[in-house]
Amino acid sequence: MKALGEQGLLERVAALLADPRHAEHPLREALEALYLQHRDQQEQLERLISISDRYQSLAREAQQVTHKRYERALKRQKKLSRISDRYQALMRERNQTLHQEAHHDALTELPNRRLIDERLAQLDRGGRRYTLALLDIDHFKQINDEYGHDVGDELLVAITRTMRQGLRDYDLCGRWGGEEFLLLLGDTALDEASGIVERLRTRLAEVRVASGDQWLSVTLSAGLSEHRVGEPYLTTLQRADQALLEAKREGRDRSQLASR
């Protein structure tokens, strides 16, 4: 006899139980009970499988939803990070611009009085040796009055360019006033500083700026003072300024050394 599968066997048992010829068979009651028990168990198993399938389906859906939410959150985070990076870069750039504007002259881009004061205070705290030189363009007001402030500004920029080229990398050149410049010559004695300033004045006298069909040039007067140990830098500046006044009284276009 050919072997039956589980479903075929159940169908045969069901057919035997339905056959009236076996109604009085002594095994019919036990077989029917076994058949019903098996069918109940099969139905319970099918319900469990169905519940398991639904649960797995819900779990997959929940996982997909969670993954989508994570992807969206990740995108938002990346977007916020990019915005934050751009904002921080903008703030750094803005701070650099503000620092530049606060510590440098707008026309010449040289350090202004604020930055020079900070550097001098640092040198005083560190006990460093230095010489200061104040340089003033002779008769600069006449140039502004006769040729205009645009020509005067052009001359200031040209002088600034030449002055930077004539100084050492560690020297500081700043715009002290309208036509006045300050040189901070670090680790430099008065005699050495005097030679540097004289060479610089010679180069600056060769600067030419065009105005119409003529070329303009200027001379500079200078006053120098060497910092004394324990002396406030403002006192050193006052002695340099006094030396500059003496150079002007002596006829300009010259340097004057302050007393040591």
Image (cartoon, rainbow, N blue to C red):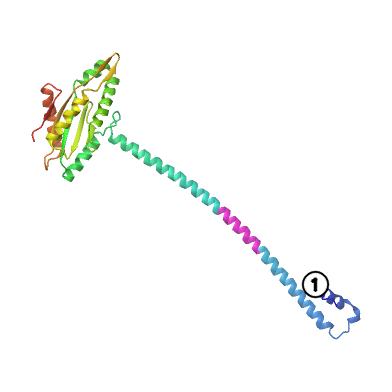
**Rendering coords of residue 194 (x, y %):** 14, 32
Q: Specify the quadrant that holds the C terminus.
A: top left
Left or right placement of residue 54 versus residue 72 in this view:
right
- Residue at 20%, 32% in the rendered image: 182
Q: Quadrant of residue 57?
A: bottom right
Q: Answer whether residue 231 is magenta in the image.
A: no
Residue at the spot of label 1: 7
In the rendered image, the residue lying farthest to the top is: 213
Q: Amino acid at mark 1?
A: Gln
- Residue at 46%, 47% in the rendered image: 81
Left or right placement of residue 15 versus residue 126 in this view:
right
* Count of number-bearing discs: 1
Q: Quadrant of residue 30?
A: bottom right
Left or right placement of residue 87 versus residue 204 in this view:
right
Q: Which residues are magenta?
A: 55-69
Which residue occupies the foreground of this view, 158 or 108?
Answer: 158
**Rendering coords of residue 134 (x, y %):** 17, 30
